[in-house]
């Protein structure tokens, strides 16, 4: 089974850019990388998804190197409300359905 | 506001009770999912319905029984649960059946406590 590895926790300050890196050495050729955000007592929320190079939307950017064995979620100018757990997901190469969720990164933003 | 609605938000039940969790989405999505999430852990996939048919059962014990009455509704019937089944149960949907690398929309879950 593919595995993803993320830092357990990170701290930053309001207004800073935050980069969270996920390692996924066994990513399958056709699989995408997806990031979700989860606040306490809520379901995860989709942030961004990408296959290669760089993807940007209104809330984040996703950087994926050519070998696709890692990805970096970039949150520009974070605020206190960005304090949450961030999950990195990739498709399992042995199953059409099973996603492998990372353990999640607890991001704490300080004033 | 979430586009996937789960009821109830909280449920406390004894080990001999029978209860059901409900999930509803009106986005026209054709794939729906049940997940179980323990504290400080990522969600664990339980079941996947694709075009109203059960397509994945991740070796879930038979005391959990899913049902998809139509494309908008998903139920999870519970019977004879164990204390270790206490968790947050999440429902999600995605636009099409197939690989779950499609963005999923999650409800806010049902917090289940087994006495």
Image: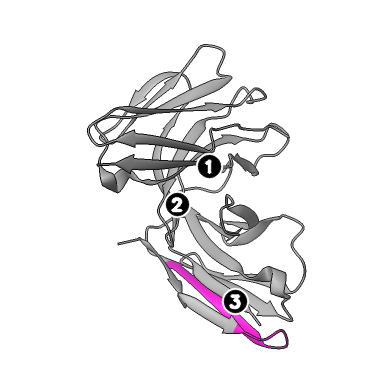
Q: Is residue A59 above or below residue A55?
A: below
The answer to whether A17 is drawn above or below residue B76 in the figure is above
CA distance for labels 1 and 3: 24 Å
Magenta stretch: helix, strand or loop mostly:
strand
- Picture coordinates of residue B27, whole percent (x, y): 37, 58
Q: Is residue B7 left or right of residue A81?
A: right
Q: Looking at the figure, which quarter contains the N terminus of chain B?
A: bottom left
Q: Which percent across, then down, holds residue A44? A: 45, 51
Residue occupying image coordinates x 36% and y 24%: A55
User: Which residues are the magenta region?
Assistant: B13-24
Q: Earlier in the sequence, mark 1 or mark 2?
A: 2
Chain to which the residue tagged by mark 1 belongs: A
Check whether the beta carbons of the residues at disc 1 and disc 2 lie within 8 A of each other: no
Residue A104 is marked as 1
Task: Determine the secondary structure under disc 2.
Answer: loop
Direction from residue B84 to residue B103 in the image, left or right: left
**Circle 2 crowding by C-alpha within 10 Å: few under 14, some 14–19, many from 20:** many
Q: Are marks 3 and 2 on the same chain?
A: no
């Amino acid at each position: 089974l593919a595995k993803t590895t993320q830092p357990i926790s990170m701290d930053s300050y309001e207004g800073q850019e935050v980069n969270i890196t996920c390692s996924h050495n066994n990513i399958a050729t056709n699989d995408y990388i997806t990031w979700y955000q989860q606040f306490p007592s809520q379901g995860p929320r989709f942030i961004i998804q990408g296959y290669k190079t760089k993807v940007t939307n209104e809330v984040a950017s996703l950087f994926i190197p050519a070998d696709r064995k890692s990805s970096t979620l970039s949150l520009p100018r974070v605020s206190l409300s960005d304090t949450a757990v961030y999950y990195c997901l990739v498709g399992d190469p042995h199953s059409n359905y099973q996603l492998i969720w990372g353990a999640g990164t607890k991001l704490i933003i300080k004033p | 506001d979430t586009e996937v609605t789960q009821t109830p938000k909280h449920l406390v039940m004894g080990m001999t009770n029978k209860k059901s969790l409900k999930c509803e989405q009106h986005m026209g999505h054709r794939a729906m999912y049940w997940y179980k999430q323990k504290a400080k852990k990522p969600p664990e996939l339980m079941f996947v319905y694709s075009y109203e048919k059960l397509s994945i059962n991740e070796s879930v014990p038979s005391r959990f029984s899913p049902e998809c009455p139509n494309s908008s509704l998903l139920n999870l019937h519970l019977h004879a649960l164990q204390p270790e089944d206490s968790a947050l149960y999440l429902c999600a949907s995605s636009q099409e059946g197939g690989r779950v690398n499609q963005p999923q929309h999650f409800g806010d879950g049902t917090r289940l406590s087994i006495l």
